[in-house]
DNA sequence: TACACCATGTAAGGTGTTACATGATTTG
DNA sequence: CAAATCATGTAACACCTTACATGGTGTA
């Protein structure tokens, strides 16, 4: 489905970026719903350039370091818009290794089972705290009052991540309660 | 990380199964957290046999149809148990194409955006209804009173799936409310 | 001048999907 | 006897990760 293609197109659409910039984006805000390594990004940028969806300009940093600053083309923008308005079928349920282990709970002894759930719970609580701090930061620096505000996308995604973590934590706690009965 | 390996090992550990049986399992209960196509399962079964973690017995169905009924070996059971008690780091956040689109909401016109959220909401509500029906069925046919009950794994996983869908629905509705302001 | 970071790429291999390919059994 | 389902496999390709490989810039 070439999702990476559209993720990159969407980012470059906002403002020109280098491959390195895109890699950084994938490791900050976007990480809550999409990510990719630089080894996947550089070949994709080449492909998008060949397809005429983006173009680049070589910029010299300092004495001789060459950067490729990518800009979206009209064709690329149209392709992005078409993808954005397309009605996709629901994705398959995301795979979850911990739930796979939980499914085989009758093969674990009780102590191991409890330990596994408690460890996982701790990690999700930490992630939730991290996300809540990120939300505090976001509310300080960006205006999110309207759908058209530059921070609205960041805000709803972060909010969704927080809700997802809370729900997962509720599930883990609920399981632990049932195991102690 | 060879997760498929352990998914298969965990299933065969309960009772002997054929590749076809495993494929069916992946398309029923397990689908809420793991799945695989037969084209991935058959080669994996061969690999696990070569590694001595499972073994098979050829069974004749009817006149000449050959089935391979796989059983877990002692080595396989130990491998499964070791994996089950291992403490894994938290997995990366699952990728989510819809959230990727939502992140680029400022590039969509208001009507398209609302339509996208409403369509997705409808689909998630349908999935939730399906899961709730599955839960009703499960409660009728299986005993889930104790951790050691055969249906406990199925129960907590289904419950987790229901909670996940409810949380996603809450998020979608929350976004829609904010977009209408 | 060492270290962290900026910047771009390729190679090998694992994971997963779609399509190709074949044949037997059961059920209506 | 036709259609659905049972049953097993391979091939090609897409997607993704880890590791390899190289070199420039800024700063303490």
Image (spheres, coloured by chain):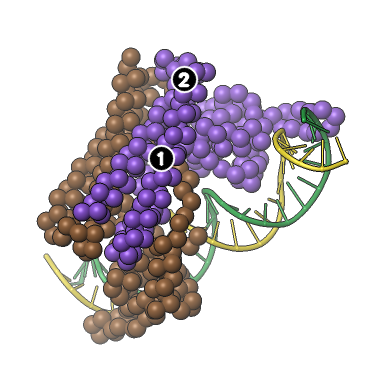
Chain colours: A purple, B brown, C yellow, D green
Element under label 1? helix
| Quarter of the image where the C terminus of chain B is located | top left
Mark 2 secondary-structure assignment:
helix
| Mark earlier in primary sequence (1, 2) | 1
Of badges 1 and 2, nearer the viewer stands 1
* In-image side of A15 versus C17 (left or right): right
Rendering coords of residue C18 (x, y %) = 43, 54
Q: Position of residue A47 (x, y in %)?
A: 63, 41
The residue sitting at 40% across, 68% down in the picture is B81
Residue B178: x and y, percent?
Answer: 34, 20
Alpha carbon distance from label 1 to label 2: 21 Å
Task: Count numbered badges in the picture.
Answer: 2
Q: Is residue B28 above or below residue A64?
A: below
- Which residue is depicted at the point 50% across and 60% down? B1
Can residue A61 be spotted in the picture? yes
Residue B19: which disc? none
Name the one closer to the observer, B6 or A115: A115
Q: Position of residue A60 (x, y in %)?
A: 79, 28
Q: Quadrant of residue B75?
A: bottom left
Q: Which mark is residue A125?
A: 1
- Residue positioned 41% across, 50% down in the render: A119
Label 2 neighbour load within 10 Å: few <14, some 14-19, many 20+ = few
**Residue B166: which quarter of the image?**
top left
Q: Residue placed at 33% from the left, 31% from the top?
A: B171
Question: On the rendered structure, is B170 left or right of A69?
Answer: left
Residue underneath mark 2 = A139
Q: Nearer the viewer, residue C26 or B108?
A: B108
Q: Please report, as a chain letter, where disc 1 is located.
A: A
């Amino acid at each position: 489905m070439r999702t990476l293609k559209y993720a990159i197109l969407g980012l470059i659409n906002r403002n020109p970026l280098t491959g390195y910039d895109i890699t950084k984006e994938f490791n900050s805000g976007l990480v809550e719903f999409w990510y990719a390594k630089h080894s996947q990004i550089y070949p994709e940028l080449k492909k998008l350039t060949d397809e005429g969806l983006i173009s680049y300009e070589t910029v010299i940093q300092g004495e001789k370091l060459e950067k490729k600053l990518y800009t979206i083309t009209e064709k690329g923008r149209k392709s992005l818009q078409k993808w954005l308005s397309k009605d996709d079928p629901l994705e398959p349920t995301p795979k979850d290794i911990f739930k796979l282990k939980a499914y085989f709970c009758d093969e674990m002894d009780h102590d191991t089972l409890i330990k596994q759930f408690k460890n996982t719970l701790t990690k999700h609580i930490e992630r939730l705290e991290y996300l809540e701090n990120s939300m505090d930061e976001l509310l300080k620096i960006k205006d999110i009052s309207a759908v058209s505000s530059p921070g609205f996308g960041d805000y709803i995604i972060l909010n969704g991540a927080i809700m997802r973590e809370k729900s997962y934590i509720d599930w883990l706690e609920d399981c632990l309660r049932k195991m102690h009965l």
